[in-house]
Amino acid sequence: MGCFVAGFLIATFGDSSLGRKNMLFLSCLTISIASSIIIFSTNIWLYSALKLMIGFCRSSIGTCSLVLLTERVCKEWRFRVGVLEYIWYTLGFLSLPGIAYVNIDASWKSLYLWISIPGICYSILAYIFVTESPRWLLMQAREKEAMALLNKASGGTLNPSQLTEPAKQSASTFNLYSSIKQLFVNSWAFKRLLATLMLGFGIGMVYYGVPLNVGNLGFNRYLSVLFYALLEIPAFITTYFLHNCRRKPSLLAFSISSGICCLICAGIGNKLPIVKPALALVSFFCVATSFDVFLIYVVELFPTSVRNTATSMARQAMVFGAIFSPFLISAGRKNDLFSYGIFGLIIL
């Protein structure tokens, strides 16, 4: 819920006052500190409050890193460069079953320290080495800073006259929530945003729900999570090679494939113990590919002035879909129609 709410309250900061870099740094640092403090919780209420804070802080991390990465290159390279974010996301995903297995007999507090302390170090490194988006700087009328970054990247071969005039034409000083206002006032932006939110809801429910359902598969949960994480690798490789393909048909094909696999899982129940986990993995591969294509597609759909806000809201739609997953999985312990069945129908 914290992640969902923050998507509307603080996502616009990345488009307005803070920028991509500062938003990324503050989000990473705050979530890491909150994850370290949570081990001192003395009751469920304090624990829940800190979890709310963790969700609130983490909402912008993926968005800022993707937007910052894709805004460093020209439009023709956005899709392929955006895939790079998924490589590191996958490495983080792969680390989780290993960390959990090493701490199999340890307290939950140990797990939090394992994942939060490296995050603090990462935040400091990001602040030192990551530079701001030149596109955002130009939109904020900070031409000198933008030109300095672009000249450094081009080896000093960039002609200032190439960008100063367009920058002056498009520069504006944003009010805090002006980017959200632009999304809702402009009819084309609102329709486009509404469509992406609907897509994000279905993809998010399945993307987060299928790996969370490993306990109902009757298979080793550590190996299951490892297999799910490994499937992220062929997913982003597939996404990379889809850069010349149209986005909508790609999303449609992989989403339908994921939905069909989920429905088959619901239909066979526990009759075929080997086939069911295999189908669940195929379903996750398809939805992970849809997930990757979808986020870069959203970046391409919206202009610089509202890109961070729109991408963040699309991610929050995914999180909103994920909110229902634990309840469906709990109901699916007795009948797979309540978990895999609904997953399949929703993404279809």
Image: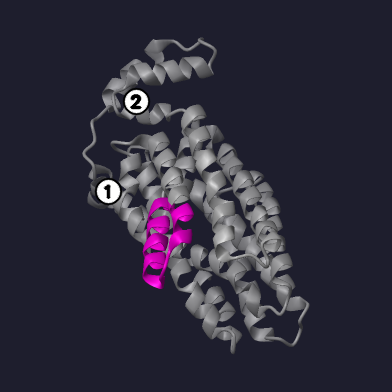
Give the mark nearest the N terminus, 2 or 1. 2
**Residue 138: which numbered mark, if any?**
2
Residue 230 x/y as whole percent: 71, 56
Is-magenta flag for residue 16? no
The answer to whether any part of residue 156 appears in the image is yes
Q: Main secondary structure of the magenta part?
A: helix
Amino acid at dot 1: Ile
Q: CA distance from mark 2 to mark 1?
A: 20 Å
Amino acid at dot 2: Leu
Which residues are the magenta region? 34-59
Rate crowding at label 2 as few (under 14), some (14 to 19) or many (20 or more) other CA atoms within 10 Å: many
Q: Is residue 232 left or right of residue 332?
A: right
Which residue is drawn at the image coordinates 38% and 11% (left, top)?
161
Which residue is drawn at the image coordinates 67% and 71% (left, top)?
280
Rate crowding at label 1 as few (under 14), some (14 to 19) or many (20 or more) other CA atoms within 10 Å: some
Which residue is drawn at the image coordinates 56% and 34% (left, top)?
77
**Residue 180: which numbered mark, if any?**
1
Q: Is residue 224 left or right of residue 341?
A: right
Q: Is residue 322 left or right of residue 270?
A: left
Which residue is drawn at the image coordinates 46% and 45% (left, top)?
28
Which quadrant of the structure image shows residue 305?
Answer: top left
For the N terminus, the quadrant is bottom left
Count of numbered tags: 2
Does dot 2 land on a helix, a strand or a loop? helix
Residue 33 x/y as whole percent: 44, 49
